[in-house]
Amino acid sequence: MSTSNAVLSGPVLVARRPPARTLAMIALALGGFGIGTTEFVAMGLLPEMASGLGVTEPTAGHVISAYALGVVVGAPLIAALAARVPRKTLLIALMAAFTIGNAATVLAPSYEVMMVSRFVAGLPHGAYFGVAALVAAHLADPGQRARAVALVMMGLSVANVVGVPVASWMGQNLGWRSAFALAAAIGLVTMGAIWSWVPALAGMRVTNPLTELGALRRTQVWMTLIVGMVGFGGMFAVYTYISTTLTDVSGLPRSFVPLALMIFGIGMIAGNLIGGMLADRALMPGLFAAMTALGVALGVFVFASHNPYTALVLVFCVGAAGMSMVPGLQTRLMDVAEDAQTLAASLNHAALNIANAFGAWIGGVVIAAGYGYTAPAAVGALLAVAGVLVIATAVAMERRSARSSL
């Protein structure tokens, strides 16, 4: 018997994960790390970007919307048009587009060029995560698809703990363009890592544009996307205004806000791992549990935010509960899309960016109406309840369809 992939521990033979597979997962997660860094760092560098481009801060904020629009447009467009492209080649091409978009941001001479460059940088976002998730699931051991997907998403979570703080520091001390230069450099490293560490994936079947577009005709695909748009919107309703909430409501010194954001990111890492395990054990019950936990965390945050210590604990809980949904949603889309998995998996991140915009908008609405900075958490809790209802409806529809086909 060969022992190249196993070691003896007493009388028990313990399996060891093949190093090549681990390296492939690291390469895929590295791309998520770069994408997460460039997406979130812009929010913290708006004053510097506005000053450098000679526009007001609200006007500079439109570059964030341009990136999100790129994600929403690029996810279905690229997934459909590139359906015939081998998966490894497509991953490298997507990171090349990401690198070019960030390099163009570094060199942008005007606000108008900056808007275009951020749109271009956002185009590969959803398609990259969708294809990377499919590749990870393809490489995973039996029964561990969601955990493999969670490892890819780990790059996005770690970006909030490491990448964004580092890029923000660079942007504040070396000029805002240096933050996007870092993102472009991560893109180049990721291209090399994918080329070197991800196998040829000859066993992965490619499709065609018409097949992929067939995902849009499947009701369960739309139901899963709605869960993400509604439920994740609740998390972003809080996250968008978390800095002011912690300083004005919790009484936390402004210098501690970066620490709070790091705690949120650590919660995302924990939630990502937990969500992957839950989804592998029981996918739909796991989604129910994650969405319910998010609703409870947001509801408790309304009251806990009045104390700095309990507020920080709930910041962790909101990040963990929110991120725990993502591996399950990604896996669910792969299941219900049948032969149109690339488009469906890519649309997940378009839906989450819509949730980002929707959550920020509705949070701003309740604050502007005079309900205070705890109101976004209350609205977010209601959105989580709506997400639970959508999941329940989807399960009921699926069971009814199964009975009628007997």
Image (cartoon, grey):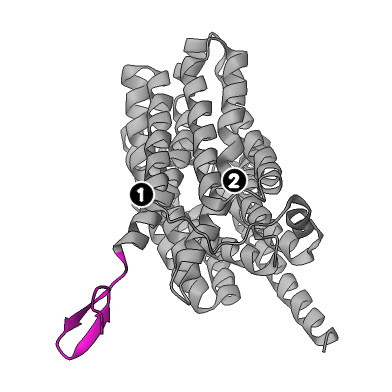
Question: Which residue occupies the foreground of this view, 2 or 403?
Answer: 2
8 vs 279: above or below: below
Instruction: Let me know if residue 58 appears in the view.
Output: no
As for residue 163 lying within the magenta part, the answer is no
| Residue reaching furthest to the right | 404
Residue drawn at the location 58% of the way across and 39% of the way down: 124
Residue 85 location, x and y as percent? 62, 48
| Gap in angstroms between the C-alphas marked 2 and 1 | 25 Å
Q: Is residue 3 left or right of residue 219?
A: left
Task: Give the magenta range.
Answer: 1-18
Instruction: Let me know if residue 145 appears in the view.
Output: yes
Amino acid type, mark 1: Ile
Amino acid type, mark 2: Gly
Could you say whether the residue bearing mark 1 is in a helix, strand or loop? helix
334 vs 213: above or below: below
172 vs 299: above or below: above
- Mark sitting earlier along the chain (2/1): 2
Q: Is residue 313 left or right of residue 323?
A: left
Residue drawn at the location 32% of the way across and 18% of the way down: 174
Residue 280 location, x and y as percent? 49, 74
Q: Nearer the viewer, mark 2 or mark 1?
A: 2
Residue 263 numbered tag: 1
Residue drawn at the location 66% of the way across and 62% of the way down: 387
Sort mark 1 into few (<14), some (14-19) or many (20+) by Cα contacts within 10 Å.
Answer: many
Q: Is residue 269 left or right of residue 394?
A: left
Residue tagged 2: 126
Residue 118 location, x and y as percent? 57, 27
Residue drawn at the location 35% of the way across and 49% of the way down: 263
